[in-house]
Image (spheres, helix red, strand yellow):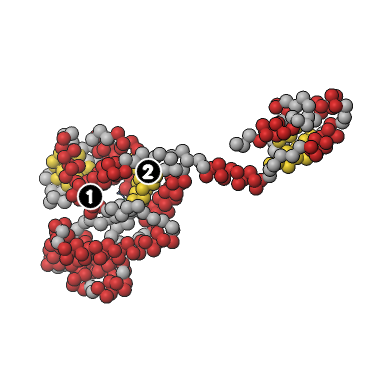
Amino acid sequence: MFDYKTLIYESAKNVLDGLDPSDVTAADAFCDYCIPCFKFAKILRKSPMIIAADAAKAISIEGIKTEALNGYLNFTVEREGFIAHALSEIGEYKPLEDKTVCLDYSSVNIAKPFHIGHLMTTVIGGSLCNIYRELGAKVVGINHLGDWGTQFGGLISAYRRWGDEARLNERGLDELLELYVRYHSEAENDEVIAAEAREWSKKIESGDPYAVGLFEKFKATTLEQAKKVYKRLNIEFDSYLGESFYVDKVPAVEQRLEKKGLLKMSDGAEIVELSDDMPPALIRRSDGASLYIARDLAAAYYRHENYDFDKCLYVVASHQALHFKQLFKVLELLGEPWEREMIHVS
Ligand code: ARG
């Protein structure tokens, strides 16, 4: 489409008898393309200047300015038209048309502030989404929420002791943070509070409606703040499935590991031994709680099965480099070829 050289040749050959495609030469200081008219002087019995001047009048190509200068025909491509044309061609460039790309980014934690680290992965992840989408890929933007852990038991305990709904509604995340800080300082010297927090934590895990209801409220409060940021950045997620969603999918991962003889016991904990340069991956603690990597393994299978991705990117701060190295290694040991399409964008 950008073959201006041929376009110029095709238009000029009717005016300049004996014109050769190689007579059209590219760019010098005066123009983008030019035709020196000296070789036509003998045949036409005119000076090159006159030949060039006559030809300049006779040749008209849309989007290209034609001028005669010292026996040369100079062609200059008009910039505006060229740019519009180039942009339209790029806009139609869709090399990833049939590809699916999962992007795990931003991935905030419930009841924690949206900090600068999250802003980084939000901006980079959001940009990658736009680029992949522009290239034609089907993009699945995933906010892998940090919504699982014993800390939420402490939060419920603190909220029931010192918090109230009106203040939570008014102050949002600030209120949650303050409650959590207070819980921590008081639980240090008060075994009753700590035990109470563990009870609530268990209740969330067992699906107790009251505990889950409170937790959902904390979740909504956190997301409300994050969504303000997303709105300003013009970012939308396709999925907010967080860690809690994968808890009941960990046993299936354990079965796969078991089948391959990869699951080992170590002091009552379930581990997968990796290569020498990596510590083992901790799947389940001796108290029965699953770990971060176990839920990420379950999430990887879920994404593979539900989105059939061609690529799965994790836009996460570099301090989690080891975590992702371990995650990909476990999948490699499990013999999953799609593990090669997973990338930690650190
Ligand atoms: N919530 C984590 C954090 O804030 C990031 C999660 C990244 N994604 C993942 N699939 N592990 O540090």
- Judge by depth and name the residue closer to the eye, 136 or 111: 136
Query: Which image quadrant is residue 209 in?
Result: bottom left
Residue 310 visible? The answer is yes
Residue 333: percent from the left, percent from the top?
A: 24, 34
Mark 2 vs mark 1: which is more N-terminal?
2
Please tell me the numbered disc located at residue 17: none
Residue 19, how many percent across, how many down?
75, 27
Mark number displayed over residue 101: 2
Real-space Cα separation, disc 2 to disc 1, in angstroms: 20 Å
Tag 1's secondary structure? helix
Query: In front: 201, or 117?
Result: 201
Residue most extreme to the front: 14
Residue type, label 2:
Val
Q: Residues within 10 Å of mark 1 (few under 14, many from 20)?
A: some
- Give left or right: position of 79 versus 217: right
Horizontal and vertical percent for residue 34? 74, 34
The answer to whether residue 219 is above or below residue 247 is below
Name which residue lies at 61% across and 45% down.
83
69 vs 128: above or below:
above
The image quadrant that residue 268 belongs to is top left
Q: Is residue 60 left or right of residue 279?
A: right
Horizontally, is 44 left or right of 187 in the view?
A: right
Residue occupying the point 43% across, 58% down:
233
Q: Residue at the location (44% across, 43% down)?
A: 136
According to the image, label 1 marks what residue?
246
What residue occupies the far bottom of the structure in this picture?
A: 166
Q: Is residue 37 left or right of residue 221?
A: right
- Amino acid carrying mark 1 in the image: Tyr
Q: Quadrant of the N terminus?
A: top right
